Amino acid sequence: MKLRQVDVLVSQGRTVSEAVRTIGVTQFTYYRWRKEFGGLKTNQVKRLKELEKENERLRKAVSDLTLEKLILKEAASGNF
């Protein structure tokens, strides 16, 4: 995990700026990740990502079904 790499590099005497550059992200990205994932273990981060992906899939399914329902409702009322 990238956050862990930065921690290791900083413990070896590098500055956060140098460590962040080494892993190929900006400081803004690093601090955003730190805020979002800082207290989580690797398996928890993976699970969070899986849940976010599943949530997005379900939202799309609900959206598609809602649209179909509206189309059918319009067709049933003769407004097509």
Image (cartoon, rainbow, N blue to C red):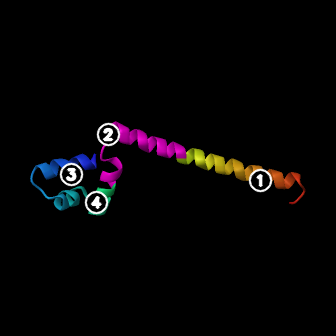
Judged from the image, the secondary structure of the residue bearing numbered disc 3 is helix
Q: Residue at x 16, y 47 (%)?
A: 8
Above or below 47: residue 64: below
In the drawing, what numbered circle is on residue 70? Answer: 1
Judged from the image, the secondary structure of the residue bearing numbered disc 1 is helix
Q: Residue furthest top?
A: 43
Is 45 placed left or right of 17 in the picture?
A: right
Q: Residue at x 26, y 62 (%)?
A: 27
Could you tell me how many numbered marks the image carries?
4
Q: Residue at x 19, y 49 (%)?
A: 7
| N-terminal label among 3 and 4 | 3
Kind of residue indicated by mark 1: Leu
Above or below 24: residue 46: above
Kind of residue indicated by mark 4: Val
The quadrant of the picture occupied by the N terminus is top left
**What residue is shown with label 3?**
6
**What residue is shown with label 2?**
42
Visible in this render: residue 26? no
The quadrant of the picture occupied by the C terminus is bottom right
Q: Are marks 2 and 4 in contact (CB under 8 Å)?
A: no
Q: Can residue 37 be found in the magenta stretch? A: yes
**What residue is shown with label 4?**
25
